[in-house]
């Protein structure tokens, strides 16, 4: 079985300048857990529920370092990036930029392996660099 046989298509997308409240409303209204960010027909990122977890509007932003001990002293300082993301107003500012994607003819076995090895829950499907669908864990369950 191939990605094109189980993918959801057409895909609900947003542009990079879509506001964070609009993205959140879209996710809630459509009962989806993520939305690709598309610019000029190409996927440039993905906003998932995880990208919206730490927001100042709902009091879940990270105001203190979560790590303790030596990591706080010798690890990278992410406080500025976390502050920016928790207060950002546009999809481009909160999206995950490094999006894993697959070809429409990718086998289901490859998709499952990607989900497991990369710790992801969905993967955009591309044909000639253009977004044509998305495969989520729910799509795999429906294929059963």
Image: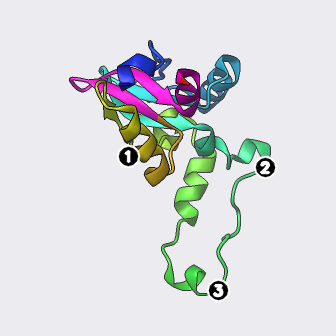
Q: Which residues are magenta?
A: 123-143
**Nearest the eye: 91 or 6:** 6
Q: CA distance from mark 2 to mark 3?
A: 25 Å
- Relative to 83, 102 lies left or right: left
Q: How many labels sit on residues?
A: 3
Q: For the view shown, which residue lies furthest in the right direction?
A: 59
Percent of width and height locating residue 115: 47, 44
- Relative to 27, 8 lies left or right: left
Element type at marker 2?
loop
Question: Which residue position is annotated with label 3?
Answer: 69
Q: CA distance from mark 1 to mark 2?
A: 27 Å
Q: Are marks 1 and 2 in contact (CB under 8 Å)?
A: no
The quarter of the image holding the N terminus is top left
Q: CA distance from mark 3 to mark 1?
A: 29 Å
Q: Quadrant of residue 108?
A: top left
| Model colouring | rainbow
Q: For the view shown, which residue lies furthest in the left direction?
A: 128
**Nearest the eye: 8 or 129:** 8
- Relative to 78, 56 lies left or right: right
At x 47%, y 21%, the residue is 13
Q: Residue 39, can we see it? A: yes
Residue 88 versus residue 31 in the image, above or below = below
Element type at marker 3?
loop
Question: Which residue position is annotated with label 1?
Answer: 98
Foreground tag (1 vs 2): 1
Question: Which residue position is annotated with label 2?
Answer: 59
For mark 2, does the 10 Å Cα neighbourhood hold few (<14), some (14 to 19), or many (20 or more) residues?
A: few
């Amino acid at each position: 079985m191939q990605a094109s046989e189980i993918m959801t298509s057409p895909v609900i997308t947003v542009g990079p300048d879509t506001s964070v409240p609009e993205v959140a409303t879209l996710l809630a209204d459509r009962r989806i857990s993520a939305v690709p960010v598309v610019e000029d027909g190409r996927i440039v990122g993905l906003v998932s529920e995880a990208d919206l977890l730490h927001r100042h509007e709902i009091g879940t932003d990270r105001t203190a370092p979560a790590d303790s001990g030596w990591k706080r002293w010798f690890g990278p300082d992410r406080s500025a990036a976390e502050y920016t993301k928790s207060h950002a107003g546009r999809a481009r500012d909160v999206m995950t930029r490094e999006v894993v994607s697959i070809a429409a003819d990718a086998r289901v076995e490859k998709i499952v392996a990607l989900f497991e090895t990369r710790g992801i829950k969905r993967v955009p499907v591309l044909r000639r660099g253009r977004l044509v669908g998305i495969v989520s864990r729910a799509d795999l369950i429906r294929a059963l």
